[in-house]
Image (spheres, rainbow, N blue to C red):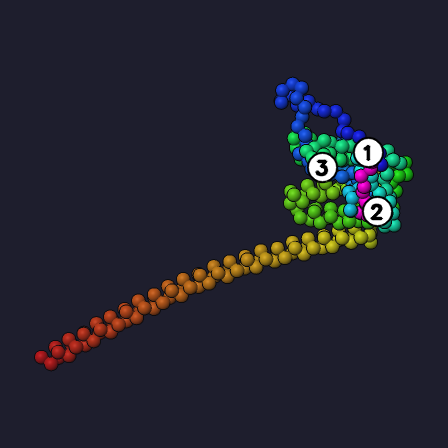
Amino acid sequence: MAKIKPAKGKPINKALGGGTPNPMPLLAANNPFFLLAHEKRFGVMFDAKGKGHVIPQLRPFSLAGGSNGVSTKKADDGSIERDYDAGISSAKKSGWVVLDPAVVGEYRVAHDVRGGQHIVHMHTNVYPGSNHVEPDRDNYIAWCQDMMEKGYVPEPPRWLLEDLLGRYERMVADASSKRTAAGDRKAAQLDGVVDTLRAALDPDAEKPTKAEEAPLEGSATAKLIAKLEAAEKAAEAANAAAEKALADTRAAKADAKAAKAKATRAETAKAKAEEQAAAAEEKAAAAEKAAAAENAN
């Protein structure tokens, strides 16, 4: 196996004083690897300008001894010899395509780290004094496209792109239905994936206008949108009914309060009338008694 080339250059960190080399990346030493591609593993990656691209989702195949059917032994010169034929053969039987650097060109670089080297794809950004690693998106996308154009990586089958498109269209509809700022942001991001997949399925088609974007009648997307619209109308009707019920409850409570106040006033008036009647009866009895006494004299 060809020796993996070291990462280019030794960047200078001026903050450390002129020509002092940057500290090593804070990454663990790892083993060499091959990348594997599969016709059923594709996704969308956005470049620096926000444009989406359909690229393979590559799987690393570690060449560590004792894993993936790989065996190792030390050569006479002290180097490590790796026998990975059995592991590669097994991967191929499962439909994986092996990107052998000896065939497709070396795509790995090695960064010196404490305890050895950390090996990554050549279009990976590794930072001195940090454990942060991220893809150099534009160059990685271009490399993946080059691998497909040269036939090293299979093109994604149409049925897979259609499946991905349907899945992301459902995700867009779901995010849009939430009617929140977060939902709107997610829907906008997913829209970019949908546009990319549509372009991959029909690269010669012009991007539709908003008026042309209505899904075909009877399609899965149209049925989903109709279902969401029906659910929205049902929710609006339920909200209206709930608001009316709340208003009716408040009116009933107000009527009950007024009736109670009226009854209280009636009870008070009745009690007062009874007191007045009793006083009148007492007054009449006293007058009758006085009249009887006068007649007796």
User: Amino acid under label 2?
Assistant: Gly
Residue assigned mark 3: 29
Residue assigned mark 2: 87
- In the orientation shown, which residue stands out farthest toward the top? 18
Q: Looking at this view, is 25 or 267 the one in front?
A: 25
- Return the mark for residue 293: none
Residue assigned mark 1: 77
Helix, strand or loop for disc 2: helix
User: Amino acid under label 1?
Assistant: Asp
Answer with the quarter of the image where residue 286 lies. Answer: bottom left
Q: Looking at this view, is 30 or 275 the one in front?
A: 30
Where is residue 60? Give x, y as percent.
Answer: 79, 42
Quick check: 248 left or right of 128? left
First in residue order: circle 1 vs circle 3? 3
Q: Is residue 290 located in the magenta-colored stretch of the structure?
A: no
Magenta segment range? 68-76
